[in-house]
Amino acid sequence: MSFSLATRWCDAPLMRRVLQFKGYRRKIQSCNNMTYTLFRHRWMKRLPVFSSGLKMASTQTDTIDLSKFPVDRIRNFCIIAHIDHGKSTLADRLLEMTGAIVKTQKNKQVLDKLQVERERGITVKAQTASLIYSHQGQQYLLNLIDTPGHVDFSYEVSRSISACQGVLLIVDANQGIQAQTVANFYLAFEAQLAIIPVINKIDLKNADPERVASQIEKVFDIPCNECIRISAKLGTNVEAVLQAVVDRIPPPVASIDDPFKALVFDSNFDHYRGVVANIAVFGGRVRKGDRIVSAYLGKSYEVNELGILRPDEHPTQKLFAGQVGYMVTGMKDVKEAQIGDTLYLKEQPVETLPGFKPAKAMVFAGMFPTDQSDYPGLRSAIERLTLNDSSVTVQRDSSMALGAGWRLGFLGLLHMEVFNQRLEQEYNASVIVTAPTVPYKAVLSSPRLIKEHGSKEITIVNPAQFPDRSVVSEYLEPMVLGTILSPDSYTGKIMSLCLNRRGIQKNMVYIDDKRVMMKYLFPLNEIVVDFYDLLKSLSSGYASFDYENAGYQAADLIKMNILLNGQPVEELITIVHRGRAYSAGKAMCERLQDSIPRQMFEIAVQASIGSKVIARETIKAYRKNVLAKCYGGDITRKMKLLKKQAEGKKKMRLIGNVEVPKDAFINVLKRKDK
Ligand SMILES: Nc1nc2c(ncn2[C@@H]2O[C@H](COP(=O)(O)OP(=O)(O)OP(=O)(O)O)[C@@H](O)[C@H]2O)c(=O)[nH]1
């Protein structure tokens, strides 16, 4: 895969225009990619517009003396909430009010910089911004992290929380507490952070801030009077949020007198500078030119660039204890960069920071280049994107039909779709994604296999490698504890959906007189693909859902094969519960019948368990009317033509080149529950 100039550095066309305008025509003619990089910083100073297109406030761009902010005048906080409750909109207002960006009508979710975020209207990547806020005659440095709301990106939230001492918990004044509000609250609560509840969208006609405040008191035990009522859209009362950040969130526990110690809580890859790490400084200071060591690798690097994010990179000479910023060290290989790594000065080793628990992938799918010659390019794209999203796990894989590829692990289906979309948009890659599956386990009974695997229990992330019953004493499936919040008028419908998905009710409470919170234990496999969509549609969008890991449970599982014209398709193998094998097989054949377009020959779609076919559908061939030119005449001639046509079709069937559309692999798992 080749990277064009535009994809290497998205600002190149803009810079060309600026150069022309500035009269640098001669330079443009010989301008290669490197020249762009060399001139970049000079341009950035002259331009009133940042690379992301944001208008920055001219007063605060030049030099920010970070030494002016001792630890007690620093606050690190993140904004957490259920999806769409207004985190990014509040971040816009905070950026404007503190002068980090110029106030304009165009500021809409400015921290959502990725194309996929803009297109889908959701945050998928946590973003940091440093704000300078004057309060009671003192200047404070507020480091804000805007986090995603969707359950699939909760790893971003938990990592962001590790760099903070407090959170703004946003709740929509109309919708009230939702499933992710509860999940995010507990993430912050367990990390012992200060929690400031903020009731947003009070401008809405149906807003009921008092009801929401009493929900917050009932569910989270936070007194009603601690809730700040705002409209992030109109800017109403947002000043009170800034004051509360200073007053209610403690400063970081870090001392300038300690040796330098920093946690890498995020990173991304820049095609020229290599790895750009986001760091939280837990002690001492670091300067440009210092030699630092990565505790993970034990390798030392020179600090080439250092700075804070406002929200675009603003280089500085130093970073001090308690501050949050970015660092470029010349790490060129993505394998060197490790989220959760501790950095320290070469001559002053320190105790390593706890880092992060690795994310637990919930959904696995095969990913293959559409054209095998793109394999090396796709490999480097996946490596770079996983650096930016450390919750994705990667393993090599190969398939008869699709060639060499990878088996990737994601936190959920939306996560998988977003990753795929980012590969296509940011790296110009074209990929085929196979049917997603959850990680099953098998307890082996065969001594030979136990020896081969080095353990009795194995995890299966590829259904094609599902071991046969004869060598297994028990299969285990992953379980989750789901939380559903909904108006009580939908309770009946929701309960029957949960039952249909093998859910076991664990708890049900009213959080106010109209809204109910239910807890269900589900097999992960039953909810991962389409449960959320169905829940939304049967509750007219009012119910919300979140889940957490609940270990493994024994289950009676079997492997179901799908055959197209008698050929087993490895990429469509699924693991199903024995009691549901027939209905699942029938449903999969029906959906494949809908997904695969009619071709010049008839296609038999079959589901089988072992050698036994349990369901079958037929995709009819386009029928060419070979009799079109026969006007009347002898019947034997017509029969001869039809026979010849049937022979031709048989040949096609023998070749068996059935074209399966890319999205059929995922659609095939989507069920239509009533
Ligand atoms: N009426 C009204 N609408 C608001 C307010 N704040 C945000 N919105 C709207 O709510 C929608 C979602 O806002 P976002 O800021 O993207 O929400 P978010 O929580 O960042 O969403 P995710 O990042 O996807 O979780 C947008 O259409 C906003 O314009 C408000 O105070 N009043």
Image (cartoon, rainbow, N blue to C red):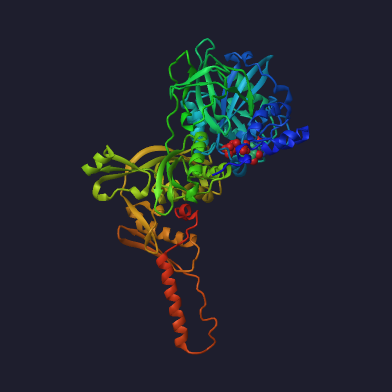
Which residue appears farthest toward the left when viewing the image? 447
Instruction: Tell me the residue at 51%/90% (across/down).
Output: 633
Residue 168: x %, y % from top left: 57, 28
- Which of the two residues, 299 or 610, is positioned nearer the viewer here? 299
The part of the image, by quadrant, that contains residue 46 is: top right
* Residue 521 x %, y %: 39, 42
Residue 163, percent across and down? Answer: 52, 24
Which residue is more in the foreground, 167 or 588? 588
- Of 91 and 266, nearer the camera is 266
Q: In this view, does 25 lie above or below 246?
A: below
**Residue 201 visible, this angle:** no
Q: Quadrant of ligand 1?
A: top right
Left or right of 323, for residue 610: left
Figure label count? 0
Q: Residue furthest top?
A: 257
| Quadrant holding the N terminus | top right
Hey, which residue is sitting farthest bottom in the picture?
633
Question: Where 240 sits versus 485, above or below?
Answer: above
Q: In which quarter of the image is residue 445?
A: top left
- The answer to whether any part of residue 140 appears in the image is yes
Q: Is residue 99 left or right of residue 553?
A: right
Q: Where is residue 85 in the image (x, y as percent from the top left)?
A: 59, 37
